Amino acid sequence: MRLATIATVAGPRAHVRTPAGYVDVAAALGDERLRSLRTLLEAGPEALAKLQGVAGPAVSPDAAIFAATVPDPGKVICIGRNYLEHALEGGSPPPTWPETFLRVTESLTAPFAEVALPALTDQFDYEGELGIVIGRTGRHVPANQAMSLIAGYLVCNDYSARDWQRAGSQ
């Protein structure tokens, strides 16, 4: 199933891809609580199951103005230097423990959106990243069950002020 957040006159809204195009989830199901991907995922597998065969007015993929996929996440946890080539590229050995950091919600951008370049850096950098959307909560989840928490994947733009990033230890 392909889900997206599309900018509409009513603000960003969750849509599901159908053969006809992207259909507004809340409008199609008659439940305004499902207007965001976050609330749709929080509603659980039953809500997602209702999207099979959903119909309604559709937005063509070519005409859709995509917003940040999950514009209102609870948190954004990032893992740095998470593969050997990336660590070596930065001139450091691979970490022995996951190097994590947080992103603030305001740093999330839509695909193709303009990015404001910070004036206080000489080392602005960007790269594509694989994002993982966790669809349900879990605690002390065994490794063999971890994949069951994943709702989906997305491509993310990651922007960094490298000089600021390297000035500290976090």
Image (tube, rainbow, N blue to C red):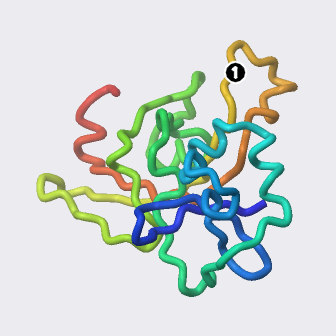
Q: Secondary structure at mark 1?
A: loop
For the residue pair 38 and 92, the one nearer the viewer reads as 38
Callout 1 amino acid: Gly
Does residue 167 sit above or below 53 in this rendering? above
- On screen, 54 above or below 56? above
Residue at horizontal 18 percent and vertical 57 percent from the top: 118
- Residue 134 occupies quadrant: top right
Question: Residue at position x 37%, y 55% from top?
Answer: 159
Left or right for 157, reference 51: left
Residue name at image x 76 percent, y 71 percent: 55
Q: Name the quadrant of the N terminus.
A: bottom right
In this rendering, position of residue 47 left or right of residue 160: right
- Residue 95 drawn at (x, y percent): 55, 28
- Determine whether 30 is above or below 39 in the image: below
Q: Vertically, is 29 above or below 17?
A: above
Provide the residue designation for mark 1.
138
